[in-house]
């Protein structure tokens, strides 16, 4: 009954989910307070108070049409508010018609890829990468082409990228701040990438779309800000989600923003609106479109994540773990203490530590720690990290 390719994926399930499920077993055996689960990027913070108040007002209101169908792209007034908010932050003049409300960033990425890909078209992704990208590209007949980042910075390697662009390259998928490294790609690196794309587009008489996956763009530290993608790349779309910035991962609400400078941007937008419907999303959740429209100035307390980052980074560094200090998101990506990262992560289970191997992100030899957990868990985990380090030293 089950298709072969789905059976294959079941047998090779996501490392993130696999470790989370392993945690369920350990919690039953040892108790939740004795298990240190850093596997899932599931924010433990509540949504901002303003967002919760907006939800309360809306759900108890008699506003007509709140729960009915709307245009597949979303409520027009919500789209206009988001376009205006993007303009205030980036200086890019967008209209509401350049915004498509989506079922989170995952839904948005699938909508974009469905719209642009012909069978065999290539999408370049930079490793380490969010593992679901491979499935999203495959969903729509595309071929994922992996370009390894520099191990010194975990930023894209322009020389490697240039070698991987072919006449079949249809898009590049960026993710900054990055999952799993927390690295924010620098403006200088992205401008170098833009120059390479322009050169290759002329060489192959093609157009390459830059898809910027930005669910962590509001989670940045130390005065860093993520470069504005639409200011650097003409052929670009932003896919965003409020899962992390407003701690609403279960509500599946986000948007696509289409750069108005794209040739025939209206045709691309129309294709995405159609794809939103025919993929079965139909439209983004209506209630939460309204909540978002009233929450555009809200975000979670990033200082809490920063405190966790600083504590965990300093403690692990003192124990001999090597890691680039992240400037965004809520992940650390240290080097494993053995070349076999899967072996390392499996040994970590002996100390009730739930980590995710770098192999799951296309980058063997490392492991991911998701620190969107309470501070008590982080503090209590340090002896376990110390015991794990002693095992390999």
Image: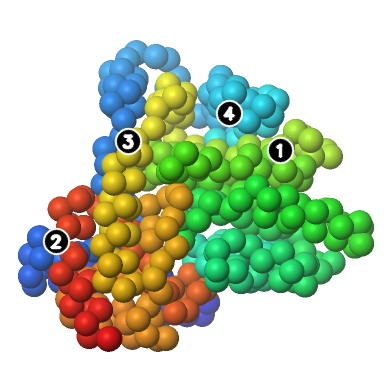
Specify the quadrant of the image occupied by residue 175: bottom right
Residue 252 — which label? none
Total residue callouts: 4
Q: In terms of depth relative to the viewer, which is nearer, 336 or 357?
A: 336
Are the residues tagged 3 and 4 within 8 Å (C-beta)?
A: no
Tag 4's secondary structure?
A: helix
Cα–Cα gap, marks 4 and 1: 11 Å
Q: Is residue 48 above or below residue 379?
A: above
Of the 4 image quadrants, the one containing the C terminus is bottom left
Residue 89 — which label? 4
Mark toward the start of the polypeptide (4 vs 1)? 4
Are the residues tagged 4 and 1 within 8 Å (C-beta)?
A: no
Cα–Cα gap, marks 3 and 4: 19 Å
Tag 2's secondary structure?
A: helix
Which residue is at 39% across, 14% downward? Answer: 63
What residue is shown with label 3? 301
Specify the quadrant of the image occupied by residue 20: bottom left
Q: Position of residue 220 (x, y in %)?
A: 45, 43
Residue 231 — which label? 1
Are the residues tagged 3 and 2 within 8 Å (C-beta)?
A: no
Mark toward the start of the polypeptide (3 vs 4)? 4
Which residue is at 70% across, 25% downward? Answer: 93
Q: Position of residue 178 (x, y in %)?
A: 50, 56
Mark toward the start of the polypeptide (3 vs 1)? 1
Mark toward the start of the polypeptide (3 vs 2)? 3
Q: In terms of depth relative to the viewer, which is nearer, 103 or 378?
A: 378
């Amino acid at each position: 009954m089950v298709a072969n390719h789905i059976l294959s994926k079941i047998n090779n399930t996501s490392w993130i989910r696999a470790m989370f499920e392993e945690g369920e077993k350990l919690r039953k055996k040892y108790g939740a307070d004795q298990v240190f689960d850093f596997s899932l990027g599931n924010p433990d913070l509540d949504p901002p108070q303003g967002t919760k108040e907006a939800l309360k007002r809306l759900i108890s209101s008699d506003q007509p049409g709140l729960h009915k169908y709307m245009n597949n792209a979303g409520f027009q007034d919500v789209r206009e508010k988001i376009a205006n908010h993007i303009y205030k932050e980036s200086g890019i003049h967008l209209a509401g018609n350049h915004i498509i409300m989506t079922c989170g960033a995952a839904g948005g990425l699938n909508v974009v890829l469905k719209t642009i890909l012909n069978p065999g078209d290539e999408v370049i992704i930079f490793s380490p990468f969010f593992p679901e990208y491979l499935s999203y590209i495959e969903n729509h007949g595309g071929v994922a082409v992996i370009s390894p980042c520099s191990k010194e910075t975990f930023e894209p390697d322009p020389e490697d990228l240039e070698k991987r662009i072919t006449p079949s390259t249809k898009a590049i998928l960026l993710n900054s701040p990055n999952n799993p490294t927390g690295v924010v790609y620098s403006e200088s690196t992205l401008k170098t990438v833009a120059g390479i794309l322009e050169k290759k587009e002329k060489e192959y008489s093609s157009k390459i779309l830059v898809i910027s996956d930005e669910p962590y763009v509001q989670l940045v530290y130390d005065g860093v800000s993520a470069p504005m993608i639409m200011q650097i790349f003409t052929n670009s779309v932003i896919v965003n989600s409020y899962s992390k910035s407003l701690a609403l991962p279960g509500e599946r609400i986000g948007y696509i923003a289409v750069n108005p400078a794209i040739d025939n941007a209206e045709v691309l937008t129309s294709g995405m609106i159609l794809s939103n419907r025919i993929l079965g999303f139909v439209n983004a959740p209506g209630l939460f479109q309204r909540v978002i429209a009233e929450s555009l100035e809200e975000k979670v307390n990033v200082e809490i994540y920063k405190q966790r980052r600083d504590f965990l980074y300093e403690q692990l560094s003192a124990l001999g773990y090597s890691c680039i200090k992240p400037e965004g998101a809520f992940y650390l990506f240290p080097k494993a203490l053995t070349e076999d990262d899967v072996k390392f992560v499996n040994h970590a289970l002996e100390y009730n530590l739930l980590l995710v191997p770098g192999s799951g992100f296309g980058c063997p030899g490392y492991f991911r720690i998701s620190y969107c957990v309470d501070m008590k868990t982080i503090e209590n985990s340090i002896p376990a990290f110390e015991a794990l380090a002693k095992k390999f030293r």
